[in-house]
Image (cartoon, grey):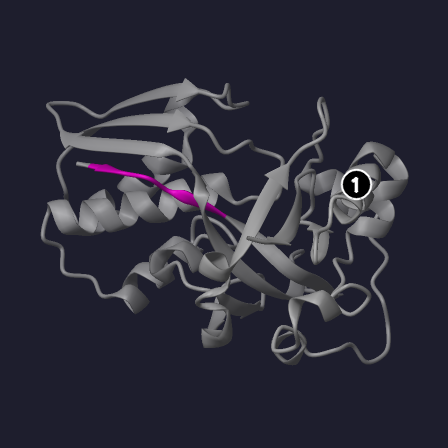
Amino acid sequence: MITYPNCKINLGLHVVGRRADGYHNLETIFLPVSDLTDVLEIEECDRLEMVQEGILLDNAPNDNICLRAWKILHDEFAIPPVHIRLTKNIPFGAGLGGGSSDAAYTLKMLNGMFDIGLDESQLEYRAARLGADCAFFVRNQAAYATGIGDRLETVPELAILNSQLLIQIEIPEGEHVSTKEAYAGLHIKEGPRIDLREAVRRPVGEWRGLIENDFEDSVFAAHPAIADLKEEMYNRGALYASMTGSGAAVFGIFRR
């Protein structure tokens, strides 16, 4: 079986407070983007195997999140070992959620391959154990996310945005922003914030100055090339441009 785990972008990202467990509560809108995908192949095997190809990751093959997804279902439902081949095209450390997507797709594929019978809500519960935004990729629909990114509310108004407009994603050469670095420089903004669900109902051309990513201030200060790329997107005619997640990727939304 083969699938193509896609990336996501964040339309706005508000960090609203630190939690007792060390995580932060967020408000953001996840939007799936199908133009950039990994390639994930899974087949039954005599022993558990993992092969990574494409972009070189900073983890050993035996510590890939896809294997952790398999283990969750193996421990609960005793599914057999599998051979997993992952071809990475989505850069890591970019705010695009590639690893989270790989994990969620692994759960979905194994659920179907072995007739486990989990519904989407049950898959989301297990995906959330693997990472903050993994649950989003189970339904893979535009969603308003709160909590640590695991509480999801569908945003139907954005369902056709990808077909109406062009989303371009780029990363400045040599730039990488770790989640740890992004949070270390974060300043949590106080006071009332715009409701992102209301903001995205406005025309895309009005989003500039209205929809913010709270990580941009500190990340742009440390990585001016990322700030320059955002400005370049506007110079090319983007209706809206932003860093996604904690960086380093920047996206621009253009008329087709």
Image position, residue 117 (x, y; %):
14, 60
| Left or right: 77 in relation to 236 | left
Residue 72 visible, this angle: no
Few, some or many residues within 10 Å of mark 1 (<14, 14–19, 20+) = some
Against 192, residue 37 (above or below) is: above
- Residue 114 in magenta? no
User: Relative to 232, is 155 on the left or the right?
Assistant: left
Q: Position of residue 39 (x, y in %)?
A: 33, 32
Q: Amino acid at mark 1?
A: Glu
Relative to 186, does residue 248 appear above or below in the rendering?
above
Residue at 40% from the left image edge and 54% from the top image edge: 137
Q: Residue furthest right?
A: 221
For the N terminus, the quadrant is top left
Between 227 and 101, the residue placed more toward the observer is 227
Dominant SS of magenta comes to strand
Closer to the camera, 185 or 161?
A: 161
In percent of width and height, residue 51 lies at: 32, 20
Numbered circles on residues, count: 1
Residue 3: name its quadrant: top left
Instruction: State the residue in front, 95 or 18.
Output: 95
Residue 12 seen in render: yes
x then y, percent, for residue 5: 37, 42
Above or below: residue 177 compared with residue 208: above
Q: Residue at x 71, y 66 (%)?
A: 205
Q: Secondary structure at mark 1?
A: helix
Q: Which residues are magenta?
A: 2-7
Residue under label 1 = 232
The residue depicted at 24 percent of the width and 31 percent of the height is 41
Specify the farthest residue to the front. 256
Q: Is residue 108 left or right of residue 80?
A: right
Question: Residue drawn 66% across and 40% down?
Answer: 249
Front-lying residue, 32 or 74: 32
